[in-house]
Image (cartoon, rainbow, N blue to C red):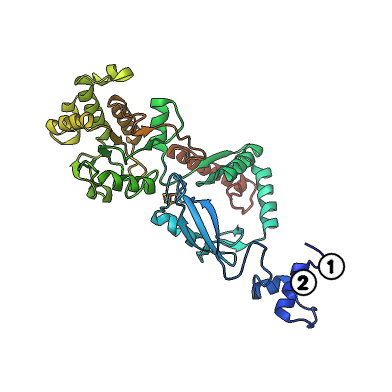
Amino acid sequence: MTTTKDGIKRRDFLKVLGVSGAGVGLSGCSPKEVEKLLPYVVAPEEITPGVATWYTTVCSGCSAQCGMWVRTREGRAVKVEGNPNHPVSRGGLCAKGHATLTHLYNPDRYPGPMIREGDRFRKGTWDEAERLLAAKIKAHGNVLFVSGHTGPTMDRLIDRFVEEVRGTRVRYDALSDAPLREAARLVYGTDSVPRFDIENARLLLSFGNDFIDWGPSPVAHNRGLAKMSAVDDHGSKGRFVYLGARLSTTGLNADEWVPIRPGSEAAVALGMAAAVAEAGADAGPYAEVLRSYSPAQAAEAAGVSEDTIRELAERFVADVPSLAMGPGQGAHHRGATAANVAVAILNHVAGNVGRTVFYDARVDAAATPFSDMASAVSAMADAKETLKGTCSKASRNLEPAGIV
Ligand code: SF4
C-alpha cells in the first residue's frame, strides 16, 4: 500500500474520491466517515463485487466441530453450509449450526467493550477496557477466566493469558460431554469422547442418549441412524431401542421404547453386561465386578421385567456388531458418569470396542466438569464477601471490583 506525502494511504484517498467525486476539496472529510457511507468502493483484492467468496471453516456451535463453508458477499457473511468434504459432518449442519450466522448480526450483540458503572453498562474503547482490566488484575490477582467453547488457537492464547496472570480457567458449556469424557478416562484412561459408529451397528441401544435432539455430534449421528435404519441389499436393517424415562424426540424415532426409571441406566447396563458374561462372553477385567450384578436387580431398579433385560442382553450379542450409548449431553444427572461407565463396560463385554465404539478422538479445549463451575461460583461469592468487607472497613462506597 503506497502512502502519499501527507500520510493518506492511496486506498483511503481513492475511497474519499469515490464518495465525494474528483475535484471536490477534501477538507472536512475523513476516511472513517466515508467508510460508513459506502463500504467497498475500493474493495480488498480478493473481493469481486457481485461475486460470492466462500471460506472454509469449522462450526463452533458445539464441540463436534462440523466442517462449514461460509458464503460472503462484499465482505459480509450471508449464508453457512455444511462442507461435504469434512469427515464429521459430510455436508450437513444442524439447526444450531445454520443459526450461528445470527450471532454475527444479533442486534443485542455488544459491538465493543462495555464497562460497568453501578448497575449500568456504558460503551468504552478497547484501550480503556484494557487499562481497566490490567489495573484490576494487578490490584486483586486471583483471576478466574470463564470461557465457552473455543477453537485450538484461541484456546492456547487464553491458556497463555491465564498462566501469565496465574489465574484459574473454567471452560463452561451448558451442554457438555463431561460425563462421557470422565467415563472414558475412568475405564480406558483416555481423555476423549467416544466416537460411535451408528451406521454399521445392527442393534443400537440408547440409554437416555438423546442424540437426535442433541449430543456430542448430532449431525454425524443423525446421518448414521438414517443409514442404519435403511434396508440393505440383503433385506435387513438395524434396530434401534431407546431405554429412557421420557419419550424424547430420539425415543420417538426408535423402533422400540423401553421405559425405565430415571437414574436406573447404570443398573440396567450392568445387569445386561452380567447376563452377557453369564452366557460365556469374556468379561476381561470386569468379570469379578459383574458377579455383583444381575438382570433381576436391574429389572427391579428400572421397573421392567427381568425377561425384558435378558432378552435385550441376548439380542445385544446376537445382532453384531451392536452398540450401546450412555446418557449424553441432554441427560446430565448425578449418575450420568456412572451410567456411562456401565455402558462402556457393556460395550467392552459385548466386544464392540474397536468395532462400533472408538476412543481415539482426543478432545482439545473441551468443557470442564460442572463441579469446576460450581467451585468457581462459590469462589466468586467468597471473593465478593471478602471485598465487601474490605470496602466497608475502608468506608468506601465501591463495588467489589475483582469481579469484572
Ligand atoms: S453439531 Fe451443529 S452446532 Fe455442533 S458443530 Fe455440528 S453444526 Fe455446529
**Residue sitting at 44 percent across and 51 percent down?**
84
Give coordinates of residue 327: x percent, y percent. Answer: 32, 39
| Callouts 1 and 2 close, C-beta under 8 Å | yes
The amino acid type found where label 2 is placed reads: Phe
Position of the N terminus by quadrant: bottom right
Q: Residues within 10 Å of mark 2 (few under 14, many from 20)?
A: some
Give coordinates of residue 307: x percent, y percent. Answer: 12, 31
Residue 301 left/right relative to 160: left
| Badge 2 element | helix
> Residue placed farthest to the front in the image?
233
Q: Nearer the viewer, residue 110 or 69?
A: 69
Q: Nearer the viewer, residue 42 or 257?
A: 42
In three-dimensional space, the C-alpha distance between marks 1 and 2, rounded to whole angstroms, equals 9 Å
Q: Is residue 262 visible?
A: yes
Give coordinates of residue 367: x percent, y percent. Answer: 47, 41
Instruction: Please give the label number shown on residue 4.
Output: 1
Q: Quadrant of residue 236?
A: top left
Residue 227 left/right relative to 115: left
